Image (cartoon, rainbow, N blue to C red):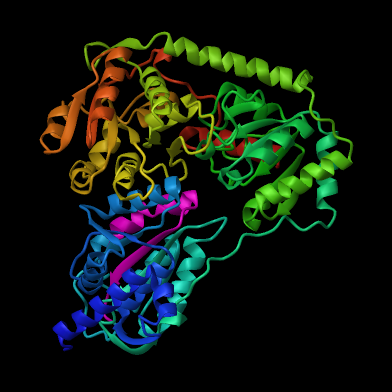
Amino acid sequence: MADTTQLTKARENRAKAIADAGGVAEALAAGTLPQRADMTLSEAIVMGLLLQEVRTFLCVLGHGSTEIGEILRIYQNAGLLRTCGVRNELEATHAATALRWVTGQKAAVVASIGPGPLHALAASIVPASDGLGVWFLIGDETSEDEGPNMQQIPRHQQHGFLRLFSVMGEAYCLHTPGAVSVALRRGMNVVDHPYRAGPFFLLMPMNTQPKIMERVNIEELPIGPPPRLGPAADDGAYARAAQAIRAAERVVVKVGGGARNAGDQLEALLQLSDGVAVLSPLITGVLPHDHPRNMMVGGSKGSLCGNYAMDEADLLVAIGTRFVCQSDCSRTGYPKVKTVVNINADIHSAMHYNKTIALIGDAALSLERLNDALRSEGAPQGDDQSPWLRECRAKRDAWLAFKAERYAHPILRDAVWDREVLTQPAAIKAGTDWARAHDAVAFFDAGDVQANGFQIVEDERLGRTFTDTGASYMGFAVSALLSTAVTTKPFYGLAFTGDGSFVMNPQILVDGVMHGARACIVLMDNRRMGAISGLQDAQFGAEHATWDTVHVDYVAWANAVKGVQGLFAGYSIEDLIAALDKAYAYDGLSLIHVPVYYGPDELGGMGVFGRWNVGNWCEATQALRHDIGL
């Protein structure tokens, strides 16, 4: 066993040298950090992550991660990183995901072995679905196979966790410590992928973590993320795409998360093509809400105008989208489209539809080339009075009137509450308007809150609203508020959640106080999973096992945690706004309980206007998909 005192001193000296110099590379350049040093595998991992600007570690430590936990302690004491011990790996993963999404700041989730990493694995479907890079440092069974380790997968086979975690993202097991630089490079290529980032699982056997590696060459630790692509190659595809667009009469442009950086070129394309845009909920604000060619969201929970544009278009330009089932009505969203122009950095997404002219490259740069090709083909700068735009604008006006009618009736009588309460549309509208006025970041949890939310938000720029529509993970929004405590770019967070989602992940009440979150939970309580109750009713005319009769005093629950401010929203918009103001004035975490309506009154929700391949709708939806043949 190594001399712990001597080992600790050597680690502290290296950490101090790095801190004094301002970074690992700077310390090497100054000569205060030797190029070669004896260190444990765990220290090499942490040092390598510092080189990648990973300085936030969200941890649930256990017997599978004590050694790396010690490295984090020493390096935190030197001011090099921040370690946050939290109550659940689900929460840690959601917070790391939100941190990357909102601010670009990277983080690592540190878990032990067994059940904890499996929690992290479950939550990692969010960054995997939404294209966000997150590191996972996972304890693993020992490499010498002396017998089953407690909490490993109980089978007599090698690398059970490696096989399991490799299904969700990319994974690497450091069975051999000397492979650390390769493992860190592979992780960087995934976490910092410029177009389709995701989770990377670094599995650390418990006996290799403390293994002392002699004369580690620190300069071997990788630096430099993968570069972005250029525009799609021009083999005549731009001209063919431009000619197809010019020949079309009704162009719809579906904008996905891969078009985040293409706002200016998107607006130019809409004018040159006389097209209208339908947005993914991931990027509300990439085109201002009041833009005359913005038809907002489309799909199985889309808007009247968004779905009209999809249903009636004869040509689709798809930009940076992966066609999640709700986004394109389970491949039935474009029944009249004859040609697709698909711009994407991923070849599989680019070739999703038949009859596709694929432009595989950077969205913004490829759009710029396509716009130039349209100009070369003599495309006008757009006709603000074209029949297609007039039709879509009429549907947009009808949609705005549809929403306004719901906002004008914010209160309905509810059978469960046995009184009049706020509707979700009215509460969400008030809350999102308040968020924009206070420059707060809004997160939406899964279910009814999410579906109503992305139909209601009116973002004028990116970065206002974040909703996990890829995995639709219950509890993401409330857990995401922890990111307000660990960011280096402070912001106020507002989580819109339902009672179902909150109860699945309530640990933010403790961790938010512990780490200094400044945020508010708006908990809309209808004592059910409203989205699924509504789906059951629509399909079968009956609800089952999606509601309860248990009264929960959420205000008392919040106030039971010292440091959390529990508030009641009352039964009016004015009272809700007053509660939000009180929450914003509070230097910490607040929870506002909002009883909301659920029932048959159409004014209580935003409705459903699309198709979806679920339940007893499957046969008809699939038949239509094959009939369309796109």
Q: Is residue 284 visible?
A: yes
Name the residue nearer the viewer: 158 or 28: 28
Taking the image as shown, residue 240 lies to the left or right of residue 343, namely right
Residue shown at the point (70%, 27%) measured from the top left? 312
Taking the image as shown, residue 273 lies to the left or right of residue 408, namely right
Residues rendered magenta in the picture: 117-142
Residue 137 forms part of the magenta stretch: yes
- Residue 159: x and y in percent read 35, 76
Residue shown at the point (75%, 22%) measured from the top left? 388
Location of the N terminus by quadrant is bottom left
Taking the image as shown, residue 330 lies to the left or right of residue 492, namely right
- Residue 48: x and y in percent read 40, 73
Q: Is residue 166 above or below residue 576?
A: below
Residue 20: image quadrant is bottom left
- Residue 92: x and y in percent read 30, 53
Residue 509: image quadrant is top left
Residue shown at the point (84%, 35%) measured from the top left? 246
Name the residue nearer the viewer: 444 or 71: 71
Residue shown at the point (57%, 39%) measured from the top left? 330
Residue 473: image quadrant is top left
Location of the C terminus by quadrant is top right
Residue 290 forms part of the magenta stretch: no
- Residue 396: x and y in percent read 61, 19
* Name of the residue lying farthest toward the bottom: 214
Taking the image as shown, residue 564 lies to the left or right of residue 137, namely left
